[in-house]
Amino acid sequence: GKYGDYDARDMQFRGVPVTKWKAGSVVEAAWTVGANHGGGYSYRLCKVPHGHYGSMSSLTEACFQAGHMKFAGEWSWAQYGDDSNNRKRIRAKRTSVGTYPLGSQWTRN
């Protein structure tokens, strides 16, 4: 197939590790950027239906919008390469004004 032919809702995710988080806990998340255009990001979760082997067809945009996560604290870190000792703490630029869904948070990179 080519790009765009696949939809994760139709795939079987057998044998994939599952991470369990306690509601309200703070966890570290990371991402990478290949070309920094000055955009931003947010994090959203949608619970896998009926455990790990349930139907993925209910993983809809509405489900993810209902699972919007808030950021913890006022700091972000920039890290270059794999060495976590090579981090620079920067004040996060966050907003919940004008975001969708209403009240969700967005952070500028």
Image (spheres, rainbow, N blue to C red):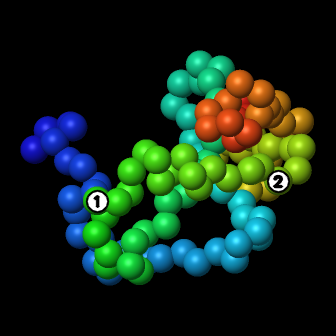
Residue 86 shown left or right of residue 48 in the figure: right
Determine crowd level at label 1: few under 14, some 14-19, many 20+ residues with C-alpha closer than 10 A.
few
**Among numbered discs 1 and 2, the one appearing first in the sequence:** 1
Give the residue at x 77% y 70%. 25
Q: Determine which residue is flagged by label 2.
A: 72
Give the residue at x 20% y 37%. 3
For the residues bearing labels 1 and 2, Cβ distance under 8 angstroms: no
Q: Quadrant of the N terminus?
A: top left
Q: Secondary structure at mark 2?
A: loop
- Residue type of the residue flagged with mark 2: Ala
As displayed, is residue 37 above or below residue 80? above
User: Would you identify the image quadrant in which residue 16 lies?
Assistant: bottom left
As displayed, is residue 1 above or below residue 59? above
Q: Residue furthest left?
A: 1
Residue 89 shown left or right of residue 50 in the figure: right
Q: Position of residue 60 (x, y in %)?
A: 39, 51
User: Would you identify the image quadrant in which residue 90 lies?
Assistant: top right
Answer yes or no: is residue 88 visible: no
Give the residue at x 53% y 24%. 35
Give the residue at x 89% y 44%. 74
Instruction: Give 97 or 87, whichever is nearer the viewer.
Output: 97
Q: Position of residue 30 (x, y in %)?
A: 64, 51
Point out which mark residue 19 bears: none
Q: Residue furthest top?
A: 37
Q: Marks 1/2: CA distance?
A: 31 Å
Residue 13 shown left or right of residue 20 in the figure: left
Point out which mark residue 57 bears: 1
User: Would you identify the image quadrant in which residue 100 lies?
Assistant: top right
Q: Quadrant of the C terminus?
A: top right
Q: Secondary structure at mark 1?
A: helix
